[in-house]
Amino acid sequence: MVKTLRGIAAGGLLAVGMLSGCSWFSHDEAADAGRRLRFIDVEVTANDNVNPNAAGQAQPVKVCVIETNRSGWMPEGIGDGAPCRETAPSEGALSRHQSILQPRETLRYRFEVPAGQERWVVVGAEFQQISGVLPLAEQKSPAQADSQMKVMVGMTSLSIVTNDKMDE
């Protein structure tokens, strides 16, 4: 009788071990999806003297953050000083976010993209005073790496403060 109980217990342990071993080979789609995607974090900050009016007082500024799949992409309204003008989606633009940025305000955007694809992020701003400088900042985000881009919106121009790869 003891041998029978031992045999049943051993068989039960063997069955449990085999069933738990199946989980080693199972396919976890959630984990795979995480490996197939990466993130681009964009932070846009306005200076305290952004977009001054005729009296020199800081004013809100319209900004747009555009995800593209090619270098050198230009929004249609750039020739008129209006890179954030709402137009029909143009070739190369994959997504677009638009906001009104107050002086000393920071806005954050996150793009989730396929890990194996390069992206370019274009940040545009519409200033009251045209300075002759293109109101755009562009940065490449290489494939396989999460990246972070920080843009400062000044009086009448944009500048990239940092673009650090977060993980490789």
Image (cartoon, rainbow, N blue to C red):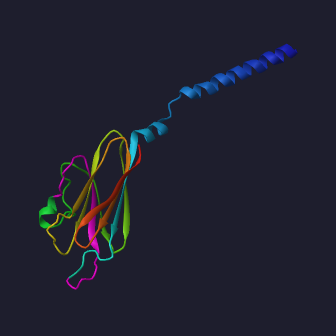
Q: Quadrant of the N terminus?
A: top right
| Bounds of the magenta segment | 54-75
Q: Is residue 13 found left or right of 34 in the rendered image?
A: right
* Residue 139 percent across, percent down from the top left: 27, 53
The foreground one among 168 and 97 is: 168
Q: Residue furthest bottom?
A: 55
Q: Position of residue 28 (x, y in %)?
A: 50, 34
| 56 is higher (above) or lower (below) than 24 | below
Q: Main secondary structure of the magenta part?
A: loop
* Residue lying farthest to the right in this orientation: 1
Q: Residue at x 73, y 18 (%)?
A: 11
Q: Is 90 situated above or below 145?
A: below
Which residue is rendered at x = 37% and y = 52% of the image?
A: 164
Q: Position of residue 22 (x, y in %)?
A: 58, 25
Whether residue 70 appears in magenta in the rendering, the answer is: yes
Q: Is residue 125 above or below residue 128?
A: above
- Left or right: 140 in relation to 76: right
Q: Position of residue 104 (x, y in %)?
A: 36, 73
Q: Quadrant of residue 131?
A: bottom left
Q: Is residue 22 above or below residue 118?
A: above
Number of callouts: 0
Residue 59 on the magenta span: yes
- Which residue occupies the extreme left position in the image? 79
Q: Observer-nearest residue: 92 or 39?
A: 39
Q: In the rendered image, which quarter contains the C terminus?
A: top left
